[in-house]
Amino acid sequence: MALVSFIGRVLFASVFILSAWQEFNEFGVDGGSAAKELRPKFNVFSKTVSSHTGLQVPEFDIKYVVAAAVAFKGVGSILFTFGSTIGAYLLVLHQLILTPILYDFYNYDTEKKEFGLLFTKFSQNLTLLGALLFFIGMKNSIPTRQLKKKAPKTKTV
């Protein structure tokens, strides 16, 4: 059963590992294509947050967000593969922060093609998030180490 669990974690983490590897290879000096895709979506997200909450989102270079995302996905998925909840928490954090920004279906009219595509990707990422939360819940509900059968006590005279 442990082998099946390990293979499942490897297959699950491969989504994040391959994505991190691709973004790492394309990073360059400006953050690569991931930064080019994220910048306009982050600007819209910042304006939405500012208009609804009155809080100003600080300005920063988007390549640092991409670098952090690559690090979270890379390190988190490797740790997750070996059964670490820390890795799962890193992947959860990545999903919680970037999913609503990248897949902003809520900014499109429901009849537009983009709405359907973004909503599908958003739903898929929610599924990944749910699986990670399930893993964390299961990991926390199982005792870390059950004591083996205790040796019988011997009476001393």
Image (cartoon, rainbow, N blue to C red):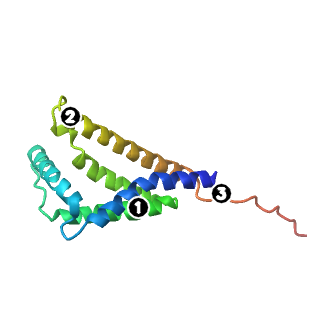
Q: Residue 80: x and y, percent?
A: 47, 59
Q: Is residue 18 above or below residue 44?
A: below
Give the mark nearest the N terminus, 3 or 2.
2
Q: Residue 30: x and y, percent?
A: 18, 67
The amino acid at mark 2 is Lys
Q: Residues within 10 Å of mark 2 (few under 14, many from 20)?
A: few
Front residue of 149 and 118: 118
Image check: 1 left or right of 139? right
Q: Indicate the quadrant containing the C terminus: top left, top right, bottom left or bottom right.
A: bottom right
Query: Which residue in the protein does label 1 denote?
Result: 76
Label drawn at residue 113: 2
Asked which secondary structure carries label 3, the reply is: loop
Front residue of 112 and 96: 112
Q: Residues within 10 Å of mark 3 (few under 14, many from 20)?
A: few
Front residue of 3 and 141: 3
Asked which secondary structure carries label 2, the reply is: helix
Give the mark nearest the N terminus, 1 or 2.
1
Q: CA distance from mark 3 to mark 2?
A: 53 Å
Query: Which residue in the protein does label 3 denote?
Result: 146
Pair 1/2: label in front? 2
Q: CA distance from mark 1 to mark 2?
A: 33 Å
